[in-house]
Each structure stands twice: as structure tokens, then as C-alpha cells.
Amino acid sequence: MNAERPGGHVRATAHPEDSESPQSLRVFVLGETRVYREALIASLRAHERLDPVGDSDCAQAATLIGEARPDIILLDAAVLTNPDIAQILQAAPQAKTVALGVSEADHAVLSCAAAGVNGFAPRDASTEELVTIIEGVTRNELVCSPRIAASIYHRLSAYCGRQPRPGSLTRREFQIIDLVDKGCSNKEISRQLRIGTATVKNHVHNILEKLDVHRRGEAAARVRSEMVGLARDQSRAN
């Protein structure tokens, strides 16, 4: 059953935690153009492992995402400019996010990374390629073009060089601080990354040491600020 709302809708389905068949990935589509959202949902329904559970514009997104409890949020790259996007995504902190229609320009990629996006679908991606990207992010893999991967690597290298203490964050530490920024507890991070809670605590301790801060919230804010700054610098350079 569909619950129609101004600006979006949620389809009432059992959540995997409440179902005996937890195989399908619950997908929510976020974008400002209704016909675009509906066409994408219709396309995704052809894939049995994907379960489109709703769509919304930004105005209604936080409420509808909270109700839908998606595993994956597909968002039009254009909505990343919305000042409330971080708060919107917090409505489902466990969900992975995939940005659609991303330019391979450095500033566009960094804007996605700063917003906590887990995967990128370029403008010319097919539905089959999008499904591959979705399945990749559920395995904590970044499925993207070599151009985007190189952009992220070089910018993160530059970021690490600007740390207040010697050394740099490892790939795993970046994964953990990203989840911290999304509001995840150590237990939730442990479950998502499939590592022990004690291991998560050790990583968080190392991150605080490297960034010379005392609280995990400070560390997450510093990383986010640096990424936003890099994205802004690159945008101005272009």
C-alpha cells in the first residue's frame, strides 16, 4: 500500500528486521523532480533484489525517509547543494547513499564525499551499472570510475598532509569517522564494518590522537570541514 504525501510517498512493506526474508535491499529515491523519481523507481522494480520503498523531494525527505527505513538512499546529485542534506540523511543513519548524475570534476566528487556519499553513479550510467554500484556499497566498496577514484585518492592525500599531528588516517579510519559523523555508535559501526567493538574503540582512539582532538564529534566535524574546504577550493579553481 502506498502512502501518498505532498512531495513524495512511502510504500508500506515489512522491514527486513521484521521479515523472514531479509534478502531485498530497501531503496529510497531522493530528488526534486517527481517524474524522474517515479521513472527510476519503475526501472529498479525490475530487479528482484531491490525493493523501492519510497521517494521524496527535500521538503518532505526527513519524515518519509524515517518512515521508510531504507537500506539505500539514491539521491540526485543536485540535492547535495541543499543546506539541510546532512540533517535529511540523518533520518536513516544506517542507510548507504549513492549520488546519481555525478560529474567527474574534482569539486563535484569532493562535494559528494563531504556529504558522506558512499557511491557515485555518473551521468551516463545505465540501470544495470547503478545496480552494481548499489550492491557494491552494501559491501562497503566504492564502485566508481578510475577518474573519480584518482580524484578522491589525491584529495585525501592532500588532506592527510594538513593534519595537525604527524601521520595520516588509514582507509579504515576514514570509514569509521564517516560513520561517526552519521551518528553511529561503536556497536553500530562494529556491525556495519563487521569488526569487533573493541577494534572500533581502538580506531577511534587513534583518530583522536592523529587529529589532536578529545571528542569523536570534534574529529568528525574536522574531517567534514576539511573535505568541504577542499571541495570549495577546487570549485573556485575551476
Image (cartoon, rainbow, N blue to C red):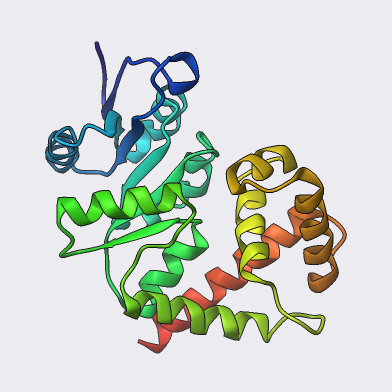
Percent coordinates x, y for residue 106 in the rendering: 38, 79
The residue lying at 72 percent from left, 38 percent from top is 187
Horizontal side of residue 199 vs 37, given as left or right: right
Between residue 194 and residue 70, name the one nearer to us.
194
Horizontal side of residue 58 vs 123, given as left or right: right
Percent coordinates x, y for residue 65 in the rendering: 41, 30
Q: Is residue 168 visible?
A: yes
Of all residues, the one furthest to the top in this rendering is 1
Horizontal side of residue 193 vs 72, given as left or right: right
Percent coordinates x, y for residue 48 in the rendering: 22, 32
Between residue 178 and residue 228, name the one nearer to us.
178
- The quadrant in which residue 150 appears is bottom left
Quadrant position of the C terminus in the picture: bottom left
Q: Is residue 79 visible?
A: no
Quadrant position of the N terminus in the picture: top left
The residue lying at 78 percent from left, 57 percent from top is 204
Looking at the picture, does residue 225 appear above or below residue 201? below
- The quadrant in which residue 123 appears is bottom left
Between residue 217 and residue 83, name the one nearer to us.
217
The residue lying at 80 percent from left, 73 percent from top is 210
The residue lying at 87 percent from left, 59 percent from top is 214
Percent coordinates x, y for residue 59 in the rendering: 36, 35
Looking at the picture, does residue 226 appear above or below residue 77? below
**What number of labels is visible?**
0
Between residue 133 and residue 21, name the one nearer to us.
21
